[in-house]
Image: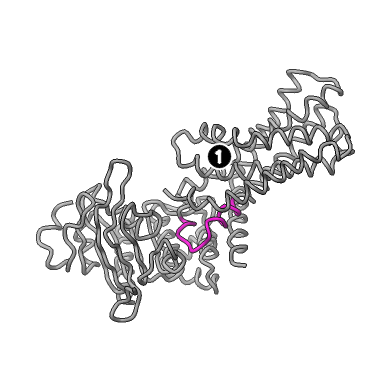
Amino acid sequence: MRTLRVISAIFLKDLRVEWRHRETLASMCIFGLLVVFLFNFAFEPAREESLRLLPGLLWIAFAFAGVLGFNRSFAAERENAGLEGMRLAPVDPGAIYLGKMLANLFFMGIAEVVVVFAASLWYNFSFIPSLGWFALATFCCTLGYVAIGTTFGAVASNTRMREVMLPVLQFPVAVPIFIAGVESTAGALKGDPIGDYSYWIKLAAGFSIIFVVLSYLLFEYVLEE
Amino acid sequence: MSSDTPHGKPALELRDVSKQFGAFQALNGVCLRVEPGDSVLLYGPNGAGKTTLLRVLSTLARPSEGRVLYDGADVHANPAAAKAAIGFVSHTTFLYGELTARENLDFAGKLFGLGNLPQRIVSVLEIFHLRQRAETPVRELSRGYQQRVSLARAFLHDPQFLLLDEPFTGLDAASTESLQVLMQCLRAQGKALIFSTHDYEQGKAIARRLVAMEGGKVRYDGPIDSAPQIGVRS
């Protein structure tokens, strides 16, 4: 119960900080929109091509928007050593991780909705018929991506070249998530039977659970100097 | 084995603690025992190891060698009890600039799982003369006020041991004086104060015990009144 209160306090603190300066969400959304716009401008795809391009394009936009978000999430902590302040309290380091991770998941979710909405307009493609499976696939993959993004964001925040270090550390580990994300999103958007791509959703869910559990257990060592 | 004081109150103790950062030896075999009611001035030149010692005592840094004990138990084996008993004011404030003073205290109180939190916050805001600035975002406060909020944060859970790393930095004369008075009150209440400052006379006005450090080692540990010539070197 106490752990849940700590997680909720950290989550709400991050939301409140973001509400006051609105830097993280704004940068994530704008970057995601730019990727969608530039791809549309570069390829001017017809509807059939859109269907082929969209899964990869969406995950590129999500990936880079996420990197910006994870970096910003720990920039606020770094400013006055907020993470150290949390470590001074008798709280489980895993609870700190879960609070930060949930806040990042929330911001990522909003950025994804904005990017998908923009993609729907620019690529003249309706996500409505496949929204349920598309949302499930995206959620499973996003959870895994945010899980490792939060951990590596904390690691990178202690390094000198943190903006470069985060994607360098995170992307190789996130490869299974990206592959599963692109494959399951493609299946959902094409309207394939769920059986054809459920393997990818299960794979993403499996990796997500592993990443969350490992990060929860190892975050204590991430926080130590 | 318990490290209880003769009064039955738990003590904070370093046993042969060393801390290494790469090739740099920040602490070298430091032994220190602090009991409730102690007021300890950590004094020494830059790089003497004062900040590292306070960070090790606060549980933020893990020693490379040796042990940190609270109530006889290793603080890293059972950190919850030690953390509840320790308040730490560092060079950095541990505050969020976008949040108000009250919101920062509320967040810290929730992390410590404090009951009766709104009343506690009102109480520390009063103690540190922050009531008028309670709803101001910390980013908009002067350095002196930020330091007060940082002190209020460290004090919120009523810790038995207060660790203060150069607490007078950035304070004006009036704030410095009120902090000195507050520290003397805390000492009178039986709290342990362990603080560092480069102003020896300022420290001497509060502390009864001096721990003089140099090169990561304790050079003197004893009553501040009988510490010959140590105060003049910083």
**Residue A37: quarter of image:** top right
Range covered by the magenta-colored residues = A85-100
Whether residue A94 appears in magenta in the rendering, the answer is yes
Instruction: Give the structural element (helix, strand or loop) at label 1.
Output: helix
- In this view, the residue in front, B139 or B213, is B213
**Residue B179: quarter of image:** bottom left
Image point (86%, 40%), residue name: A194
Q: Main secondary structure of the magenta part?
A: helix
Image point (58%, 36%), residue name: A170
- In this view, the residue in front, A174 or A110, is A174
Compared across the picture, whether B186 is left or right of B232 comes to right
The answer to whether A199 is drawn above or below residue B202 in the figure is above
Compared across the picture, whether A220 is left or right of B174 comes to right
Q: How many marks?
A: 1
Q: Is residue B185 visible?
A: no
| Residue type indicated by callout 1 | Asn
To which chain does the residue with label 1 belong? A
Compared across the picture, whether B115 is left or right of A195 comes to left
Q: Position of residue A133 (x, y in %)?
A: 83, 42
Image point (71%, 23%), residue name: A38
Q: Position of residue A123 (x, y in %)?
A: 82, 27
Whether residue A34 appears in magenta in the rendering, the answer is no
Q: Which residue is mark 1?
A: A71
- In this view, the residue in front, A121 or B86, is B86
The answer to whether B40 is drawn above or below residue B18 in the figure is below
Residue positioned most to the bottom: B7
- In this view, the residue in front, B186 or A123, is A123
Q: Is residue A41 visible?
A: yes
Please state, as top left, top right, bottom left or bottom right, where the N terminus of chain B lies in the image.
bottom left
